[in-house]
Image (cartoon, rainbow, N blue to C red):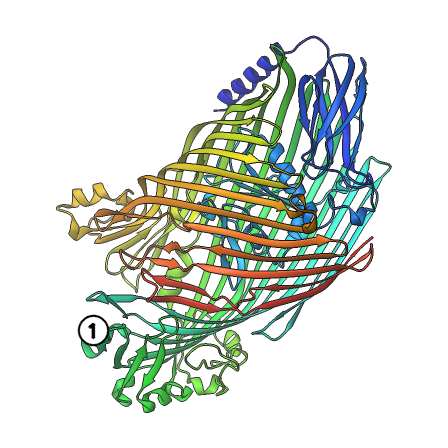
C-alpha cells in the first residue's frame, strides 16, 4: 500500500510540474470590514477580464496566482455589501491589495460582523464560495440561540437532526445517516470516542468554546473518506480572527421549571496579536448544570387481536443530576515570515455527570396472558407478582483532548502543509453503585387485582385493589435483591500525521491547483469493565425515608426510596469478592465479556486537481486508504456456574479502498449557482460490533462480536441549485442519494431452524471453532446486509427582509426543510424485512424569525424533527422516537459597545420526549424535562 500511495503522490506532483508555465506573478491581500478590525471569510476575489479567482480564508486573506505583469481591475464580491473594485499594477515582484467592505460605521454597529445579520452573511458567503457542498455556523450564529451543547447548535443546520439525553443534544445525524456513520473533527483533528461505537458524544463540548462549525456534505479527496453522511469540523478561535487585542466575558444563569434551580455558566475569551506576527488565543468555559427529569417506561408489548398490551414490565424513574463542564482552548499562531505560518492548537474538555436515579418497576406483567384480562385499549388487569425499588448512584467523567502542531509554507506557486496531531478521549465510571430491593409473591400475601390503565398511552395509570397498592408503597415489604458496583474505564487514543502539497499552475490557460498528500492515523481503543454483585439479606425499611417526589409530573406516585444517602454506606460494607454474599458468576461474566483492545492504523494518500474554467469549477481526484486491524477480545465460558473460565481471542485483518470523488460548481450568472457531486466513502465497523468477544451460557447460547465484518461502502450523489436574489438572501434546493452496501445489523441464528450442524455452521458468519463445541443452540452476532439506500431533498431559504421592503429593515427570516426516505433490507428470523435506516427522520425543518437593528437583536425559532427508527425490537414492535417540535426565543440588548444583556427561553412549550413500540399507543419511554430560561450578560473589550 505504501508504494501505491507514494506512486500516486509522485504522479500528482509530476503532473503539477509539467503543467507549470512561464514565470508569472501573484496578488495577495486581505478583505475586512470597513473598520479593518474584522476579517471577512468567503469573499470571492477575481480579476476583471482574466480567468483568475480566489476565496478569502478565515483570516480574510487571499492569493491570486499566475498573473502576468500589467494593470488589472480586482473585484471583491461579498454577500451583504456592494461589490468592491480596485486597480492594481502587478510587477515582477507581485502586488499587495487590501479591501475594506461595507459601511464606515462603528465596529459594534456593523451588521457584517456583529449580530444575527453577520451570522447569516458569514454562513451564506462561506457556503457560496466553497467548491464542495457545505453548511456553516459562524461564531455569531453560535450565540443566536440558548444552546448548551454543540449538538443543540447543529440541530438548526439543513439536513441535520439530533438525539437527546436528559433534554440536551448528544448525537448528530446528517441526512438520515446516524452518528456512527459520520465523522467529527476539532480543528481538522479526528475526535475520538470513549464509547464502544464510532459516534462522538457532542454533549460534553460547550458551544461557547467554538468560533464556528462547518459541515461538509460532499467530500473531496483531501478529506478522510470514512463518513457516509458528511464531516463535522468544530473550529476554535485564532488570534488572527480579529485585529489587535480581544477580550470577551460571558456570565449567565439558567432556570428550569422542574429543578427550580439556577445553574451558573461562565466563559472568558482572550486573544491578542503581537507585532503582527504572533497570536495568542485563550478561552475557558465552566458550567454547573442541574437537571431533573420525570420518566416512565415499558419493557415490551404483546399484540393480541391487533391490540397492544403491556407484557414485560412497567417502571417510572426520577433522575436528579448535575452536569459539570470545564473547557479550555489555547491556540498559538506564528507568522514566521511572508512564506511560513506555524500553529499550535489545543483543546481540553472535562465533563462530569453526577447522577442519582430512583426507579420503581412493576415486573412480570406477561402473567396477564394467563391470569388477567386485556381491555380494548390495551389496559391490563391482573394480580401483581413482583415490584422493584431501585436506586443508582453514578458519577461519569469524560475527557477529550486534542493537540495539533503544524504549519503552511508557500514558495512561488507551491504550498506545503504539514501537521502532527494527538487526540485522546476517556470515560471513567469510578465506583458506581446500584441497589435493588424486591417485593416478591405479592398475590400470595395481598390478593386482589390492579389495572394498568392505558387510556393515556404515554402515562399508564395504576388503579385497582387499594390494599395491594398500599402494600406496594410500603418499604417494609421489600428485601434486597442485589447490590451492584461498577468500575469501568474506556480509552481512545489517536496519533496522526499528514503532509499535503499543492501547486498553482495553468493548463492551456486554465487555472489548475494540483494537490496531493499523505496521512497516517494510528488509533488504540481499550475497554475495561469491572462489576461486583452481592446479595446480602437487608430490608428496604432501613434505607427509606418514606417520602415521595415533590412536584412529580406523571400519573403514579414516585418514592424517593431507596435513599441514595443511606445506600452509600453499602459501598464500604460490600467490596470483597471473598464475602459469602458475593455473586461470582454474574460478576465474572459482566466484568470480562465487555473488555477489548483494538489497534487500527489507516494510511491514506490522495491526488486531486481543482480546475477553474471560468463559470465552471471542477474538483476531481481519488483517495486510497489502507486499514490494518489488530483486535483482542475475551471469550467467557459460563456453561457451568461452578467452573467459570475466560480466554483471550485475537484477530487481525487488512484491506484497501480506492475512493474517487468529483465536485462541480457552475455559475450560471452572478446570482445562480448549480452544483453536482459524487464521492465514494466507507465506514469501518463499530468497535463493539467487531470485537472478537463472546459469551456462552448454560443454555449453550452464544453472544459474539463479528471480526469478519466488512466496512460500510457507499456511493453518494448530490445535485443542487442556489439562488442569491438580494444582498442578504439565498434560496436553495438540493437532491441527494446514497447507495449503501454492507450495512451492519444484528442477527440471530437458531440451531433448530437448520437441517444439520453443517447447515447451521455455514449460516453463522463467524467460525465457532474457538468455542470447542458442536452443540451450540443459538448465536447472536452482527452481519453485513446487501443493500440500503437513502433519497432526500433539502430546501433552504434565508432572507434579510429589508432587501425586499425598507419598512422591514432589520427583520430576518431563515427556514430549511429536509425530506428523506430510506430502506434497508435486514435479517428477520431466517428471512428478511425492510426497515428505514436507523435514526433517519422523514421530515426535519427549522424556522426562525428575527430582528437585528440598533441595540436590539431578537429571535424566535422552531425546530421540528420527525419520528425515526431508534432500535430493532422485532417486526411490528421496533422502537421509534416520536416527532418533536421545540420552540425557543432570545432577546439581546446592547447597552453600549462593551455590555450586552440577554434573556433566552428553551423548550418553551414544555415538549416531552416520547418513544414507542411500533405504534404510538405502545409506550416505550416518556420523559419530561421542563422549560428552561436563560439570563446573562456579555462584556466585550
Extreme residue in the bottom direction: 467
Quickly name the residue at label 1.
369
Q: Nearer the viewer, residue 783 or 117?
A: 117
Q: Residues within 10 Å of mark 1 (few under 14, many from 20)?
A: some
Q: How many marks?
A: 1
Residue 761's quadrant in the figure? top left
Q: Is residue 31 above or below residue 765?
A: above
Above or below for 845 versus 395: above
Residue 65 shows in the view = yes
Q: Residue furthest left?
A: 755
Q: Residue at x 42, y 86 (%)?
A: 475
Which is nearer the eye, 369 or 806?
Answer: 806
701 relative position to 33: left or right? left
Camera sees residue 205: no
Picture coordinates of residue 771, whole percent (x, y): 28, 48
The percent coordinates of residue 482 (x first, y second) are: 40, 74
The residue located at (59%, 62%) in the rendering is 352
Does 399 appear above or below 585?
A: above
Q: Residue at x 49, y 56 (%)?
A: 864
Q: Position of residue 774 (x, y in %)?
A: 20, 48
Q: Mark 1 falls on what kind of element?
A: helix
| Depth check, front residue: 881 or 318 | 881
In the shown orientation, is residue 835 left or right of residue 600?
A: left
> Residue 799 location, x and y as percent?
61, 45
Q: Nearer the viewer, residue 661 or 99?
A: 99
Toward which corner of the image does residue 17 lie, by quadrant? top right
- Residue farthest right in this picture: 275
Question: Is residue 901 rendered to the left or right of residue 160?
Answer: right
Amino acid at each position: 500500500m505504501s508504494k501505491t500511495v507514494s506512486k500516486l503522490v509522485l504522479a500528482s506532483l509530476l503532473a503539477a510540474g509539467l503543467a507549470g508555465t512561464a514565470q508569472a506573478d501573484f496578488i495577495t491581500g486581505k478583505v475586512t470590514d470597513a473598520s479593518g478590525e474584522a476579517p471577512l471569510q468567503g469573499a470571492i476575489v477575481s480579476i476583471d477580464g482574466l480567468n483568475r479567482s480566489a476565496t478569502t480564508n478565515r483570516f480574510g486573506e487571499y492569493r491570486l496566482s499566475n498573473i502576468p505583469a500589467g494593470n488589472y481591475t480586482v473585484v471583491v464580491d461579498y454577500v451583504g455589501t456592494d461589490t468592491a473594485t480596485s486597480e492594481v499594477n502587478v510587477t515582477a515582484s507581485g502586488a499587495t491589495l487590501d479591501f475594506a467592505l461595507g459601511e464606515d460605521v462603528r465596529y459594534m454597529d456593523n451588521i457584517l460582523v456583529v449580530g444575527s445579520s453577520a451570522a447569516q452573511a458569514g454562513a451564506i458567503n462561506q457556503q457560496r464560495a466553497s467548491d464542495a457542498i457545505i453548511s456553516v455556523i459562524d461564531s455569531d450564529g453560535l450565540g443566536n440561540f440558548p444552546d448548551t451543547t454543540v449538538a443543540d447548535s447543529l440541530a438548526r443546520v439543513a439536513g441535520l437532526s439530533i438525539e437527546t439525553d436528559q433534554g440536551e443534544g448528544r448525537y448528530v445525524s446528517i441526512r438520515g445517516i446516524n452518528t456512527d456513520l459520520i465523522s467529527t473533527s476539532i480543528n481538522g483533528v479526528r475526535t475520538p470516542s470513549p464509547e464502544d461505537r464510532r459516534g462522538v458524544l457532542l454533549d460534553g463540548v460547550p458551544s461557547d468554546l467554538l468560533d464556528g462549525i462547518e459541515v461538509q456534505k460532499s467530500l473531496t479527496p483531501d478529506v478522510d473518506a470514512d463518513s457516509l453522511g458528511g464531516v463535522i469540523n468544530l473550529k476554535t478561535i485564532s488570534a488572527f480572527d480579529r485585529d489587535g487585542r480581544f477580550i470577551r466575558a460571558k456570565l449567565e444563569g439558567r432556570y428550569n421549571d422542574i429543578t427550580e434551580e439556577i445553574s451558573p455558566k461562565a466563559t472568558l475569551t482572550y486573544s491578542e496579536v503581537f507585532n503582527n506576527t504572533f497570536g495568542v488565543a485563550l478561552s475557558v468555559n465552566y458550567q454547573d448544570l442541574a437537571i431533573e427529569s420525570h420518566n416512565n417506561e415499558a419493557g415490551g408489548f404483546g399484540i393480541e387481536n391487533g391490540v397492544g398490551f403491556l407484557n414485560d414490565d412497567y417502571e417510572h424513574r426520577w433522575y436528579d443530576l448535575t452536569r459539570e463542564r470545564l473547557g479550555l482552548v489555547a491556540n498559538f499562531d506564528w507568522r514566521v515570515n511572508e512564506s511560513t505560518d506555524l500553529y499550535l492548537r489545543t483543546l481540553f474538555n472535562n465533563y462530569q455527570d453526577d447522577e442519582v436515579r430512583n426507579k420503581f418497576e412493576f415486573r412480570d406483567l406477561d402473567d396477564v396472558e394467563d391470569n388477567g384480562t386485556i381491555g380494548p385499549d390495551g389496559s391490563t388487569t391482573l394480580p401483581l407478582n413482583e415490584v422493584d425499588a431501585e436506586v443508582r448512584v453514578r458519577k461519569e467523567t469524560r475527557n477529550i483532548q486534542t493537540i495539533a502542531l503544524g504549519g503552511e509554507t508557500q514558495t512561488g506557486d507551491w504550498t506545503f502543509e504539514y501537521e502532527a496531531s494527538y487526540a485522546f478521549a476517556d470515560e471513567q465510571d469510578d465506583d458506581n453503585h446500584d441497589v435493588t430491593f424486591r417485593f416478591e409473591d405479592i398475590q400470595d400475601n395481598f390478593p386482589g387485582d390492579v389495572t394498568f390503565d392505558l387510556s393515556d398511552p404515554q402515562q399508564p395509570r395504576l388503579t385497582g385493589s387499594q390494599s395491594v397498592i398500599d402494600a406496594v408503597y410500603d418499604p417494609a415489604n421489600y428485601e434486597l435483591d442485589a447490590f451492584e458496583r461498577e468500575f469501568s474505564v474506556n480509552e481512545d487514543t489517536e496519533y496522526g500525521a499528514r503532509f499535503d502539497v499543492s501547486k498553482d499552475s495553468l493548463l492551456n490557460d486554465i487555472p489548475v491547483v494540483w494537490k496531493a498528500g499523505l496521512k497516517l492515523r494510528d488509533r488504540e481503543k481499550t475497554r475495561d469493565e469491572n462489576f461486583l454483585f452481592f446479595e446480602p439479606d437487608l430490608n428496604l425499611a432501613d434505607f427509606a425515608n418514606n417520602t415521595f417526589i415533590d412536584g412529580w409530573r406523571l400519573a403514579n406516585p414516585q418514592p424517593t426510596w431507596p435513599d441514595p444517602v443511606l445506600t452509600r454506606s453499602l459501598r464500604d460494607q460490600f467490596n470483597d469478592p471473598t464475602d459469602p454474599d458475593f455473586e461470582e458468576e454474574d460478576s465474572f461474566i459482566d466484568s470480562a465479556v465487555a473488555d477489548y483492545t483494538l489497534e487500527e492504523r489507516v494510511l491514506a494518500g490522495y491526488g486531486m486537481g481543482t480546475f477553474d474554467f471560468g463559470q465552471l469549477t471542477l474538483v476531481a481526484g481519488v483517495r486510497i486508504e489502507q486499514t490494518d486491524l489488530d483486535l483482542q477480545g475475551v471469550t467467557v465460558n459460563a456453561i457451568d456456574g461452578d467452573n467459570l473460565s475466560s480466554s483471550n481471542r485475537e484477530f487481525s485483518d487488512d484491506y484497501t479502498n480506492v475512493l474517487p470523488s468529483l465536485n462541480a460548481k457552475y455559475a450560471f450568472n452572478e446570482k445562480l449557482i448549480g452544483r453536482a457531486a459524487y464521492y465514494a466513502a466507507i465506514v469501518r465497523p463499530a468497535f463493539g460490533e467487531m470485537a472478537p468477544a463472546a459469551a456462552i451460557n448454560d443454555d449453550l447460547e452464544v453472544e459474539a462480536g463479528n471480526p469478519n465484518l466488512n466496512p460500510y461502502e457507499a456511493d453518494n450523489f448530490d445535485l443542487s441549485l442556489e439562488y442569491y436574489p438580494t444582498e442578504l438572501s439565498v434560496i436553495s434546493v438540493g437532491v441527494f442519494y446514497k447507495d449503501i452496501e454492507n450495512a451492519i445489523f444484528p442477527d440471530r441464528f437458531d440451531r433448530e431452524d437448520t437441517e444439520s450442524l453443517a447447515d447451521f455452521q455455514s449460516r453463522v458468519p463467524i467460525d465457532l471453532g474457538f468455542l470447542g463445541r458442536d452443540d451450540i443452540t443459538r448465536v447472536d452476532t452482527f452481519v453485513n446486509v446487501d443493500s440500503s439506500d437513502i433519497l432526500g431533498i433539502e430546501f433552504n431559504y434565508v432572507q434579510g427582509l429589508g432587501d425586499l421592503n425598507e419598512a422591514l429593515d432589520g427583520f430576518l427570516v431563515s427556514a430549511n426543510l429536509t425530506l428523506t426516505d430510506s430502506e434497508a433490507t435486514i435479517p428477520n428470523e431466517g428471512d428478511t424485512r425492510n426497515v428505514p435506516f436507523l435514526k433517519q427522520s422523514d421530515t426535519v425543518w427549522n424556522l426562525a424569525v428575527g430582528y437585528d437593528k440598533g441595540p436590539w437583536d431578537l429571535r424566535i425559532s422552531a425546530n421540528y424533527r420527525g419520528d425515526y427508527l431508534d432500535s430493532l425490537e422485532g417486526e411490528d414492535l421496533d422502537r421509534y422516537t416520536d416527532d418533536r417540535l421545540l420552540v425557543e426565543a432570545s432577546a439581546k440588548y446592547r447597552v453600549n459597545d462593551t455590555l450586552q444583556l440577554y434573556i433566552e427561553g428553551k423548550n418553551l412549550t414544555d415538549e416531552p420526549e416520547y418513544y414507542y413500540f411500533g405504534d404510538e399507543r405502545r409506550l416505550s419511554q416518556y420523559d419530561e424535562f421542563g422549560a428552561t430560561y436563560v439570563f446573562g450578560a456579555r462584556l466585550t473589550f
